Amino acid sequence: MHILPHLSVPRNASLVGFVAAACLIGLWTSLVPLLGADGSRLPGDLIDSRFIGYVLEHGWLWLTGHEAGFWSAPFYYPMTRTLALSDNMAGALPLYALVRSFSPTPEQAMVWFLVLCFGLNWSAAIMMARGFGASLGASVVAAYPVVGGMTIAAQAMHPQYLLLYPVLLAFWLLGRFLLAPDAGRAAMLALGATLLALTSYYYAVFFLLMAVVAAALQALSDRGRYGAGLRAFRFSPSSLATLAACLLLLACNYQPYFMESLETGPWPTAMTRGLSPSLAGLVAPPPGSFAWGWLEGLTRVGSEGHLFAGFFPLAGLACGCFLLWRRPDRQGALAGALAVAAAAVCVLFLDIWGTASPLRHVPGLAALRVTTRVTVVALPCFAVCLALCLDRVLRSFAPARRGLMLVALLGLVVTDQYVAPQAYPSHAWAPARERVTALAARVPADAAVIYVDPAVSMDDPGYWAVHVDAMLAAQRLGKATYNGYTSWLPPVLGLFYARDTCGSLDAWRNVAAALYRPGADRAALYADSAFLGRLQCPVDPAALEIPQGRHQGPLPAGERRADVRAVAAFDPGSRRLRVDAVVRNLGGSSLYGLGDFSHQGAVFLMAGVYDGQGRRTEVPLGRLEHAIGPGATLAQRGEAQLPPGLEPWRVEAFLVQAPDGAFSGPPERAAPVTVCVGCVQ
């Protein structure tokens, strides 16, 4: 294999000092703002960061025998497979277990865990560039934008995405395999890709797409050598066994995700589009950038949309195009193919495609929500090309000047990537731990399940922080909790999250039990619940009814009566009718907005619109957002577009239960709801 000549200057001692200086600068400018010089802080806010800590600690408790099951972490009780709602961090669990074994608290373990990840990121980035033939000095300069500076600042709100070493390791193993395919390298690539998939589903999908496109480009550009390599390739028994073991492990890991996706379905397009890479985001640096702060006012993007990574990664992409075009050697051509493939995959996820994105409807990819992460996975490919081209430039200088040039380049890349320390999102972990300690002290010792009422609306920044507090307190006490937090919400989660009523909480427990714990004894399932806060729910297991599950029959019969009070507003310009309704269930059976899973038996909020001549038109306003237990109350807003010619004079609100879950004509009232209507004119 042809290797680019390594630079001889700086010499060994100087080169070691150069590498150490680069790592220390990256540590001081990127990691210290997140963790503090004394390790007293953690990245992100009190929500996502602590949730990742909860997931890792759950894995540690499972490894040490303190938790019975890995997948069913005891939040969102009585739901199971809760870890399938987010990354389960299984690939990072061995590293966390290593530091947790000598750390007195989970927070201190998290600090050391991130320190080790930072070191592994640096080592893997340098090793990846060296694997393609770059010199050590050029590899260090090119690696800096990948593992420090703006990349770290942009991902700090989500600590799980600071684990870049599995991505870098996978790309290094991919390069080794494509340059010289053999059974041993295929087995190593399978192991590396499996580690990546177990660590981050997002990163694994993006890596797989880039690898496939790069391999195709490589095959098209060098058909003869590629075809000969494939014809000569043979799997050995050990490599086949390794591949089979990796596939089995991945199948076991993703089977719960697949099962959960059957219930949840793909992300709504409106939500995913707002979290997709945008053209504006490509020129939006993270807040606090020293060299590129002047770009902040030019575009407006969301918190996930700051994708500009500085000058050096863009230079790496340009170098990749050059290497693919000139093909100086096999390593350079492969690096160029990787860079171009990475850029192409990023383009495929841009929000310019809207709902017609080529990847939006591919099975399995519909679960991807925050696709801005694709740009992070592309950076290592750009870095390798930058390192190879830097070597070509540095060879034109006299040996005595190469060391000075490397130092100057390091200074430029640090300036390019520098972000003000106060711009890195982080929080002090000691006060956050004290919050959990104080909450845990309030939990009755005999309570098996707890629910902590946030006492604020969902729009309040502290709402989800209280839910994570409850999760951590329950974890510390070895209890379950109705509280929870994930970015991928279960389909019926809103049954109690948006409404702080006992009826809504009962509805959540009923539906979750029917879905995830069929046949469970209700008296044992709901016994010994403790409610902390303003929401005090008496628990009477004998009075709870389990509604239909996925494969069960229609809603149980029963008297259905409701009191519906509404206020209506009509905008003549847009012809939009808005109805704010308050529904109180006066019957002895719950009213379900979902019905069963085909929405049969769903209860709809309707508007009876009267014109000036007294003619009535019935307009559907949508299913009930949440189930309403007996005696419970639901406030809901519904909107509808009125047809031309219908001028509302009086509006009344009422409920119907549809047998087919859809309105193609006048609604059939198979199980009518008796209502008392409050009307407005």
Image (cartoon, rainbow, N blue to C red):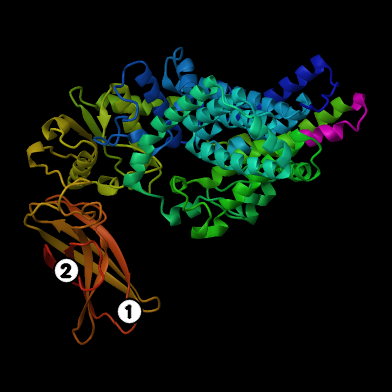
Query: x, y percentage for residue 350?
Result: 57, 53
In this rendering, would 518 be left or right of 172? left
Q: Dots 2 and 1: beta carbons under 8 Å?
A: no
132 up-or-down from 268: above or below: above
- For the residue labelled by badge 2, is the local secondary structure a helix, a strand or a loop? loop
Of the pair 349 and 244, the residue shown nearer to us: 244
Please identify the quarter of the rendering in which residue 280 is found: bottom right
Q: Nearer the viewer, mark 2 or mark 1?
A: 2
Query: x, y percentage for residue 304?
Result: 53, 46
**Residue 383 visible here:** no
566 up-or-down from 424: above or below: below
On the rendered image, what quadrant is the N terminus found in? Answer: top right
Q: Magenta stretch: residue 450 in it?
A: no
Using the image, tell me which numbered label, if any, was put on residue 668.
2
- For the residue labelled by badge 1, is the local secondary structure a helix, a strand or a loop? loop
Please identify the quarter of the rendering in which residue 387 is found: top right
**Disc 2 or 1, which lies upstream in sequence?**
1
Other-residue count near label 1 (Cα within 10 Å), few / some / many at <14 / 14–19 / ≥20 = few
